[in-house]
């Protein structure tokens, strides 16, 4: 079981985002190496999510 680290250190939004990007890339790399999904599947999924978000953003824009 992973050890839980309790800290009260405040970091900037930029540093939090940078940390999140590094964590996501590490997880993606591990999942691709283990064969959970391929790089092509990842790219296709990112494109799909991007299209869906653009559609939702358009709906939000017109409903305001």
Image: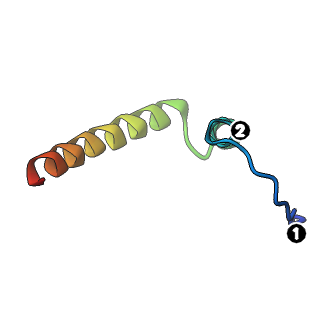
Which quadrant holds residue 17?
top right
Q: Is residue 54 above or below residue 4?
A: above
Q: Residue at x 88, y 69 (%)?
A: 1
Residue in front for this viewpoint, 43 or 12: 12
Q: Position of residue 60 (x, y in %)?
A: 18, 51
Residue in front for this viewpoint, 16 or 34: 16
Q: Is residue 52 left or right of residue 63?
A: right
Q: Residue at x 63, y 36 (%)?
A: 14
Q: Are marks 1 and 2 in contact (CB under 8 Å)?
A: no
In this picture the colour scheme is: rainbow
Question: Please, what secondary structure does the residue beneath circle 2 have?
Answer: helix
Q: Is residue 60 above or below residue 26?
A: below
Which quadrant holds residue 48?
top left
Q: Residue at x 49, y 37 (%)?
A: 42
Q: Position of residue 10 (x, y in %)?
A: 75, 51
Q: Is residue 44 left or right of residue 54?
A: right
Mark 2 or mark 1, which is nearer the start of the sequence?
Answer: 1
Q: Position of residue 4 (x, y in %)?
A: 86, 66
Kindly report the distance in space between the C-alpha atoms of the residues bearing marks 1 and 2.
20 Å
**Residue 26: which numbered mark, if any?**
2
Q: Residues within 10 Å of mark 2 (few under 14, many from 20)?
A: few
Q: Is residue 64 left or right of residue 21?
A: left
Q: Residue furthest left?
A: 62
Q: Which residue is mark 1?
A: 1
Q: Residue at x 70, y 40 (%)?
A: 19
Q: Residues within 10 Å of mark 1 (few under 14, many from 20)?
A: few
């Amino acid at each position: 079981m992973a050890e839980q680290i309790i800290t009260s250190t405040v970091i900037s939004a930029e540093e939090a985002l940078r940390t999140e990007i590094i964590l996501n890339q590490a997880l993606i790399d591990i999942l691709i190496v283990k064969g959970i999904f391929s790089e092509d599947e990842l790219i296709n999924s990112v494109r799909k999510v991007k299209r869906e978000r653009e559609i939702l953003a358009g709906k939000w824009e017109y409903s305001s």
